Every structure is written in structure tokens, then in C-alpha cells.
Image (tube, grey):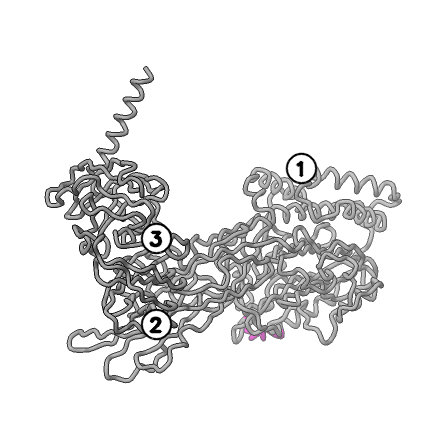
Amino acid sequence: MLKGLFILAVLILLLSILQTCHSCANSKLLPELPKRSRTYTADGVRGSDPYVDDTFLSPEWYNVSFNGQQYLMPDANYMPSFKKCGTVQPIYLRDTHPDIDTLTEVPQTIIACELYPHDDCENTIEIFIRKCDNTVHYYLRRTSSNAAYCFDPPNLQNVNVTDSSAAPTESLGTLTVTPELRFNEVTNRGVVSLIPSLAFLCAESGGANIENRDLLYYTYWFIDGVISYTQQSYNGIGILTEDNLRSIGFSLGIMIRCGVKLAKNETGVQTKLYSSENFFAGIKVNEASITMSKNEIKTIMLQPTVPYGCYKIKDQPSPTAECATKVHMFLPERDRCSLSDTNLGTQNIIANQERCGFKILGCYPGDPECSVTKQTSAMNITTRFLSYDDPKSYVLRLVAQNAMTHQIWKGYVIDDIVVNIKDDTDFHNKVCFSHVNPHMCTADGKPYENNDFAGEFILYRNTVYNIEIQERTTSCFSVNSRPFCTCAVAVRAGGDVFLINLCNDLKFIGMTACKDNGALVIRLLDEFNYQVETNIGTLVNIRIRPYPRFIELMNIDIVMAPKDYASTEGLCGTFDSNKQNDFHDRDGTVLSDRLQFINSWKIGPGDANYLSPTCNSNVRTWEEDGEQLFCTCDCFSEDLSSSCSTLNPEAVCSPSQYINCTVDLQKTDDLCSNFRDKCLSDKRKKRSFTIDPNLEMKRRATLANTRQHTRQKRQANEQGNISKEQAIELCTNSISQSTASKNFSNLLTGYNVSLITEHCIFDVYESQDIGWSEAHVEVMNDAVALGFKRNSNFTVTHKDKLMSFNKQSCSFGRNGKENCTEEALLCFSH
């Protein structure tokens, strides 16, 4: 039974081989063909001239044509010598080689011999031969160790090389591959053009002068370590041209090495191989693999190693236009990103410059020196921050889009640059907040109170990117009386300012500057909740009326981004993982006194104040502030060969890192349109009166300082004689039994639940108002929502939890309403 199965397996194998044999399409070029001739002796040194070894040769059909010449395996009539054919044990045909004129596509079986010093046919190997379209193919199998098949070029076929002349005694000096820019004449319709082309010289130095001796030079060109082109001449060492390279399927981005052997004639024994070092022809990148932090801008240095040329018409002056070509950023993956309940992104390598790549300078015919073409160029890249689950590795590719008439430069793709992103800064789940009246906490987690006086403060400022958040506090109950609550917040990045000011009789929500129209992304989540994302990924959550009694009250949460690390100042502290230096003044001096710290960040006469409605915010755009734009290159194609063929060399640039993102519930455009309608028209008509928009804004700003009536402390929600124990019980139960605590505690990272409970107890007990507990439960809900947004992987895989949370938090937190609408805030806007 087993014997029958074995025979069946052998028959199946033979059938498979025969099917393969009859398919001429199934063949590949046999490697190292020029080294397999009977006159070639290798030295066996790796990196110089290693032996050919077919020990691991894949069993299949091989095409043995090279440089347009048909190579054939020598037979017993022209047996090779030991250590010839570029190997140790050469392999030849045991019998006479079949007549190639009678060969067809039907394979013939032939026997090959491995030659050893003690036996001309120590081992035999059964192979096949066929002819497809006048080209001879051999089906070859693996050999013994240090053995390889011999193949001769036409000039050595049927020639007995054992009687040939000995190798020359002359030697060569040091060889170096040197690129050279040349110009070839091309005539079209009587016009002669000089077209650029590269040539690679195998230059010799330090050797004996043998140019006038009658020697045959064999020049071997190794491309990426493999002999890919050969030349033989009595006139000296060969030159590899751009046309030679392109004819064998090579472009730039290759390692070139030249090797030379000498012989007295075509059948004579060759000398050892004199070899150059490898020369990289293309654009060198200083780092093939880059590791960068999320808060870094990384510079990639690129240096061309070969010249670039531009054509001109013969006997006419060179054009006045600059001779240059451009290399563009190309993203192998399509760039996708979205901002919604969670932030998601794929490819997020962004240039920090206005061109998708860099420029390579070149030369016209007749230019005296073309060293300018090898000047080093620099390209700045950064990453955008969308969520804690952003990919940790990206691939950056650069491709030459168009090189005019210099053919070898066209479509040249630089080796991929792998960009690895490291999380070496402690930015995860770091939140600075101002809650209720207001209880403060720095980004490094230091709690304190800002309830001593009303005022306007710099809450957060990024000192690198000049992004700023300001807040204003006012009396929660009556003028100049404690407690004080936040009634206004302004967020500024570049030329965009977003303001919510509900102080006293002013109810303003809108933009006061839209010069960049993209430095801020503003989303309206529900009727009392705005989220603002800055162009470095800092997330600002603004909750209006967390306690329904107080229309003016706001909670502010600022979720830090990587580019905030060690770059912030203000009431949010220094954000450097050190609580001890969070209290500091404007000179950076660490302060021990809380009030001194708070006073240091009051907005003074020398500060820009963004907390009042205006049509004339004195802000500079992102570029005017000296910041680099975020630029993207929309060059993407599933087919690399066609990618970037029509790409505009200019990048698509924006002050926003969200340049390619889709944004759910975006309000930025609407708010900017409203700002332009109100402020940027020459004049507005209303009831036949002409209204100056600037005066109208000033009038509205004065409302922030006036109040038509004074609210009383005691209202329906209040209960007198609330003991400390009752306040503790109420707040502990409200917060611990909240949806956020019971079902989503894993998303509360960055918030100290015990601290929020303490704040609740303090507010309920001091105000004798149980309603304040709602405000702190709302803090918990907002914390969970921010957790969903930043932890994208969790959110994507738990969409049911997100839907459940939105439903529960909406029905509870938004004043008991079953539907979350935006009508209330739209009223404020008017």
C-alpha cells in the first residue's frame, strides 16, 4: 500500500514537472552568468568576488541569455578546469551538447557532471533543455556545496581554453565609480538638442601605466551586488551609461560597483578581479528609519549623489529659467482621519513646509561646474495628534515626479523612510480643569481654588505655538460677592479666536477673529456643550450651565496634547510631570503662595484680551506668528507606477493639523460665516439704519459688566440646615451611583473622583444647595465623553457603550430633557 502511494506521488511530481516544461513563460534569468565562463576565476572573498554556489538554486527553468548573447553549457569536449566558472566544483555536460538548431519547446533530458580534482564526474545531475523563441532554456536543480553550473558566452563556445595564453602579469590600481553628466545630440526636424545623460566611470588611480599595452579589459558592472552588465575592450576599462542601465531595467536608487579583469585575448586566462567599492547612485537619506516623539518636528536630510541635467538647443544660450527638478512626498497609504465622538486617523505624517518635498538643482550644457546639483536638501516633518491610539509607525515615500528630458530621474522612488513614533512624554490622560466656582487643577494634577476674587485670567498658554485660553470669573450670586463662577472663556490659535461670554447681561457665542479659519476646529455636541480642538491637538471641552440655576456658569476641561509637554504656562501649570513647579510667575520663578500665583496670571494692560466681543481682534495669523504650516500631499494611488504623475508640486497647506479630516458636528464654518456677516461687510442695514459693526460689538461687550437684577442665594432647590454629613452622603451617592462611575470608570483616567467628590461636598455644604451635586455629576459625564474621544480603539470596538452613554448622559445632564437640541445656544448667539 505504501509503495503504491509512493509511486503515485512520484508520478504526480513528474507530471507537474512536465506541465512546467511545456510552459515557456515559466523561466527566469540565471544569476551571475558572466562569472560562469571557463576563463573566469573567482577569489571567493565575500564583498569582493565570491564563489558562485548553486547549493540553494531554486529548481526551475532558467533563461541563459545575457546582454543579447546566448550562453551555453560546455560539454565533455570542452571540459572546464577545477576552480573555474567562478566556483570551486564546476558543472558541465557529461555528453555532447544537443544541437540547438534541433531543439524545440519539448524538453530533452541531459546529464550534468560535478568536476572534482580527483574525479571529472564525481556527481551527476539530471537536468532538461529546451528552446523557446530561439532562446535556450535549462531546467536546473540544486547542486553540492561550492558547486555551480558553467555557461560560456559565444566567443568561448567550442573553444578549448586549456591551451589558451596565461593571465597577464600586469596589475591595476584602485578603482572608483564616478558619475559624470554628459549631453547627447538628438536631432528632430532639423533642430539639434543636447539631452542630458549620466555615465559612470570606473576610474583607476595608483596603478602601473598599462594603457598602451595590448590587453583585453573585461569590465563587470555589479548592480546591487549582482553582475548585471559586462563589457570587453582592448581600449581600456568600460563605461556604464544611463542607456545601458535603462536597457536592463534599472533606474536610480541602486548600488553600483565595477570590477575589471585582464586577459591577453578572448580565450586567454583572466587575472583576478580588481574591484571598486560600492557607489550609491540616487538620493541618500540621512536616516532610513526615524524615531521621533509626538511633540517633535524632525528634519530629514537628503543628498543627491549623481548630477541632474537640463536640455538646451545646440548653439543657443542656456535658458534663463532655473535648471531643477522636484521630489515630492508620496503617501503609500490613503490619508483618512475623522473627528467625532472619537478621533481616528491613519496616515498622519505631515510636512512642515509649503512644498511636498524638495528641489534638486541641475546644470545646462556648458555650465563650468555642476557641483550644485549635489547640494544637500532638508525636509521637515511632524505628526498630528488625534488620539492616544494613533499608529506608532508610518511609511514616508518620496518620488521624482517629472525630470523633463533627464530620463533616468523620471519616476525615481527614494527608498521608503520608516517613521517610528515614540511615547516618551507623559501626556496621556493629563487634564487641566476649572470647575464650578471654580475648583482648579493643573495638568500635572495639583488642585487649588480660585475663588478669592473675580477676574480675567490666562488659564493656559502654549509658549511654543502661542496658543492661549483665557477665562473670566464673576460672582455666582451678586456683584463682588463670593462664590465666583466662570462666565467667559476664549480660545485663540493663530488668527482664530472663539469666545463664549455669558457674563451678566451679555450672551455671546461666536468668533471674534477668523483670519485662519482652521486653526481651531469647533464642534457643538449638544445645546450646552462645545468642544474646541486646537491645531496641535489640545482638546478644550466647555460645558455651559452644568447646574441649570446658573446660566452663566461654565466648566472648562483642557486635555493636553504631546506638543503641550513642557511648553505651557498659566493657571494650568507647567505640564512637565512635576507638580512642585506648577505655581510659577511669568518669569518662570516657582511660587509657594497660591494667591501670588493666581495674581501672576491675571490679564493685565500689557496682555492681549480675547474675552470681549469685537470685530477687531488684534491677532496675527498662524504664519504671521512665525509658525510653520501643516502641509499635506494628496498624492495617492494603488498603482505606484502611476502615482504622482499629475500632482501639483505645491502642497495643500493649512494652519490646521486636521487638513484632511472629516469633522462631525463642525460649527467652525458657520461661526466664521456669521462673524464675516456681522463684522467684515462695509455696513449693515437694519430698519433703514446703518449700523457700525464695531460699535455694535462694543455695545454688546458693555453688557458683560451690567446686570439687570441680582440673583438671590436661596431658591427652590435650596434646603436650609444641610449638615456636613448630609452633604457627604449626597455627593458620595450621587457621584458613585452616576452612570460615569458605575458603567464607565475605565474612561475616567486623568480625573480624581475623590477630588471631584470633595468639591461637590464643599459646594453643597457651603451654599446649602443640593443642586450643586448635579454640576459635579456633569463633570463626571464630560470626563467620560473625553475618555471616549481620546481612546479611539476602545470606542471603535465598543460603539454600543458609546451609544448607551450618550443616551443616558443626554437625558440626565441636559436639564432633564429627552432630546438634546441646540436651540438654546442659538438664542444666545442672537
Kind of residue indicated by mark 3: Asp
User: Could you tell me which secondary element the residue under label 3 belongs to?
Assistant: loop
Drawn side of residue 596 relative to residue 658, left or right: right
Drawn side of residue 699 relative to residue 13, left or right: right
Q: Which residue is mark 2?
A: 208
Q: Quadrant of the N terminus?
A: top left
Few, some or many residues within 10 Å of mark 1 (<14, 14–19, 20+): some
Residue placed most toward the observer, 820 or 497: 497
Q: Quadrant of residue 442?
A: bottom right
Q: Which residue is mark 3?
A: 639
User: Could you tell me which secondary element the residue under label 1 belongs to?
Assistant: helix
Any mark on residue 743, and which?
1
Magenta range is 686-695
Kind of residue indicated by mark 1: Asn
Any mark on residue 24, and which?
none
Drawn side of residue 809 relative to residue 514, left or right: right
The magenta stretch spans residue 694: yes
Query: Residue 547, can we see it?
Result: yes
Q: Quadrant of the C terminus?
A: bottom right
Q: Position of residue 492 (x, y in %)?
A: 62, 66
Few, some or many residues within 10 Å of mark 2 (<14, 14–19, 20+): few
Q: Position of residue 227 (x, y in %)?
A: 32, 56
Separation of marks 3 and 2 at Cα, in angstroms: 52 Å
Separation of marks 3 and 1 at Cα, in angstroms: 47 Å
Q: Residue furthest left?
A: 102
Numbered disc in front, either 3 or 1? 3
Kind of residue indicated by mark 2: Ala
